[in-house]
Image (cartoon, grey):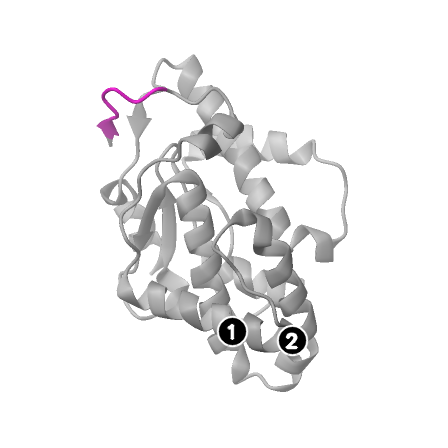
Amino acid sequence: MTDADGREEPSDLEDHDAEPLEVSPAPAEIEELSKACLEYVQRAVGMELDGSSETLPILDHYLSMVRETADGRPSLVPLIGRAVGAYFGEVARRHFGGSWLLPDADAHHWLVGLAPVYLSFNPVGVAYDALFARADHDGPSSELKLAPEEREVVERRLGALPEMTETDYFRLSTRLEVLEIAVEALRAELHAEGRSDVVFEAGDYEGELELDK
């Protein structure tokens, strides 16, 4: 955890989008998987993804198309899940700022740790949820990993959201909105504590990797 010397604190997420935190290049494996996702979507729906959050509905549409195929051909699931998870993880990482943590080849252990707040998640788990439109599957968990004392803050904020169907909730576009709400709530806590200049780095999330194994 380091201080962001000279960084102007974003007052809201619109400012955060306008001046995103700098991010390092993605690991080579993530780059390759993200490119595979682009190719899958291009072949299936004839549309291109550009790495922005605005094109996540295109990816949601692609997943709705392949959902039935994936149920009948389970060998496709790891390929689609890892590719879509890598792409979604990169969208989120560049949207908020953060780091990939890939301790080994098992995607169940992969995380993206955000920089502006202490929050990490497994984007492959998010992709599995979106693919099956449910959380009951053999893929990684998509649960948000938070400091214990901050979990109630985020859960209370998310609990105030309007009710929606599971299919809608598990869409990638919706899950990014969930992350935005969680980040807003955690940033407000940091501001109240006088710690608005804190930035979380990959090393701050090493404990989460140990818990996942």
Q: Earlier in the sequence, mark 1 or mark 2?
A: 2
Circles 1 and 2: CB atoms closer than 8 Å: yes
**On the image, numbered disc 2 is attached to which residue?**
66
> Label 2 amino acid?
Val
Residue at 47% from the left image edge and 19% from the top image edge: 11
Report how far apart the C-alphas of labels 1 and 2 lie in the structure.
9 Å
Residue 41 visible at all: yes
Placement of the N terminus among the 4 image quadrants: top left
Is residue 122 in sight in this rendering? no
Which type of secondary structure does the marked residue at label 1 adopt?
helix
Mark sitting on residue 80? 1
Whole-percent x and y of residue 29?
A: 31, 68
- Disc 2 crowd rating (10 Å Cα; few below 14, some 14-19, many 20+) is some
Q: Is residue 204 above or below residue 47?
A: above
Q: Residue at x 61, y 30 (%)?
A: 157
Magenta stretch: helix, strand or loop mostly: loop
Give amino acid for label 1: Ile
Instruction: Tell me the residue at 46%/51% (across/down).
Output: 91
Q: How far from the left and from the top, in percent, is residue 196?
A: 36, 19
Tell me if 92 is positioned left or right of 47 in this view: left
Where disc 2 sits, the SS reads: helix
Query: In the visual, does 100 lie left or right of 185?
Result: left
> Which residues make up the magenta segment?
2-8
Residue 61 vs 147, above or below: the answer is below
